[in-house]
Image: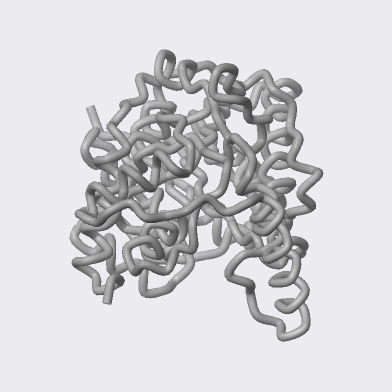
Amino acid sequence: MNPEKVFVTGANGMLGNHICRELLNQKYLVKAFCLKDNRQNLLKDLDLEFVYGNVLNFEELSREMEGCDYVIHIAAITDLWPRRKEIINKVNIDGTKNIVKACKKHNIKRLAHIGSASSFNSGLIDKPGDELEPFSGWKYGMDYLDSKYLAQQYLIEEYKENNFPVIVINPTFMIGAFDSGPSSGKMLLTLYKNQLPGYTNGGKNFVCTVDVASAAVNALKFGRLGECYIAGNENLTYKEFFQKACLLMNKPFKLKKIPYGLILSVGFLNSATARLIRRPPKLSYGIARLSNVSQYYNVSKARNELKMTQTPIENGIRQCLNWFQENNYCN
């Protein structure tokens, strides 16, 4: 029996890198579709096919998808600044529509779409949010949050109205290697360099990137079509997370709690200044607001139905730090 081929968009990002490796581990053929930049070097040791293109160009997307069995759609713009930017909606919504159109044209067996846990309202530590919670991200006024939710709703409607074979994977806050941005790992890098001013009252659901990759690849065979799956692991306060990180860095935990009013004021001033000088703020007002929210989730659905692995977050922190050190991010 010939191995099945998976078309992966956004393959050169942190999650894409892990997903490509997991696909190869499960004996799939991989066709990596991505924008051309230096991040392809992170995949140069892998036995996969590289093709370059843009999800906004339907013709090249469709041409390269031909002959594939499955699609994992990761490509997205995750910028949180500026809060409103038209290209975010174009890539995250219109790009997803192009993916669906191409999948239909080539009779793709199943699409695994990478969404965001933020498309569901989070909860408290004793009552975490799940896939039944409504979206409440409108209040933050961020195109990234809104666009990921709208793309998800479009896909669910495609399943309901046209029986389109799709599953949505909704990662929480991922930590792991290959974070070339850096993106989520920037928080650890700032802590490592003693540049983190303190911690806030909120918390997140943290997950190792390798576990999200396992959920995404398993979704090609497991799970229910038309369903969303929050891919996460440990609910931790920021204090708990930074304590774990400091322990792994062999440094004492000296961070102090920052009052919410102060963090909001700093975020507001930073955002106002950023608009004037046209440079991204280190801390925006929107992120300041989110920093005090308890973003906790119940991840049992993905664990049970997608057989998602659950690696201790310490492993993800260690993998992230090791990768930063090996690639000279810590200098």
Q: Is residue 49 left or right of residue 173?
A: left
Q: How many marks?
A: 0
Q: Quadrant of the N terminus?
A: top left
List x then y, in percent, for residue 54. 56, 63
Does 320 sit above or below residue 239? Answer: below
Task: Using the rendered view, name the quadrant where residue 310 is placed.
Answer: top left
Q: Quadrant of the C terminus?
A: bottom left
Does 287 sit above or below residue 26? Answer: below
List x then y, in percent, for residue 100. 63, 41
List x then y, in percent, for residue 135. 74, 32
Q: Residue at x 53, y 53 (%)?
A: 75
Q: Residue at x 32, y 63 (%)?
A: 192
Q: Nearer the viewer, residue 42 or 292?
A: 292
Task: Using the rendered view, name the quadrant where residue 284 is placed.
Answer: bottom right
Q: Residue at x 66, y 21 (%)?
A: 163
Q: Residue at x 24, y 70 (%)?
A: 327
